[in-house]
Amino acid sequence: MKKKNRGIIWVCLFAFIILAAIAINWILILQKAHSTFENYYVFRGCTRLVKRTNTYGLCQLSSGQTIKLVKFENKWFLDGDLPICKFHFCF
């Protein structure tokens, strides 16, 4: 194998490893955010809690906008942004 080709392979491998690390980090951040109401509250940038029950919460953003956070299958989501579930698989 030529030296030039070896260099290209190393650069591609390094780029792949960096992108994989970023993707894994983002997945872990999202899993933590969806795990509890408090984590999702912070993740969405809420500044004031308006109302909270066991299944939903209303919070206010710094812009003044009120958003609704809902619990779906033991995870928290923005209302209207729930995952699509088909054949017992959600994405």
Image: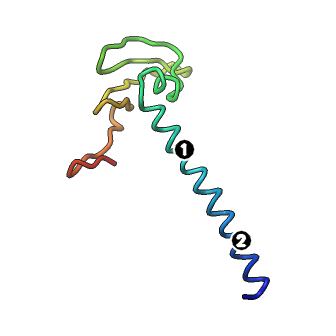
Q: Position of residue 28 (x, y in %)?
A: 51, 40
Q: Position of residue 84 (x, y in %)?
A: 28, 46
Q: Amino acid at mark 1?
A: Trp
Q: Residue at point 44% right, 18% down?
A: 59
Q: How is the image coloured?
A: rainbow
Q: Earlier in the sequence, mark 1 or mark 2?
A: 2
Could you tell me if the residues under marks 1 and 2 are in contact, i.e. CB atoms within 8 Å? no
Instruction: In the rendered view, tell whether residue 42 sits above or below residue 1.
Output: above
Instruction: In the rendered view, tell whether residue 29 sits above or below residue 89.
Output: above
Q: Is residue 30 left or right of residue 52?
A: right
Q: Residue at point 62% right, 63% down?
A: 16
Residue topped by disc 2:
10
Q: Position of residue 29 (x, y in %)?
A: 53, 37
Gap in Å between the C-alphas at discs 1 and 2? 24 Å
Question: Callout 1 environment at 10 Å: few (<14), some (14 to 19), or many (20+)?
Answer: few
**Front-most of residues 61 and 3:** 3
Question: Callout 2 environment at 10 Å: few (<14), some (14 to 19), or many (20+)?
Answer: few
Per the rendering, the mark at residue 26 is 1
* Residue at the farthest left position: 87
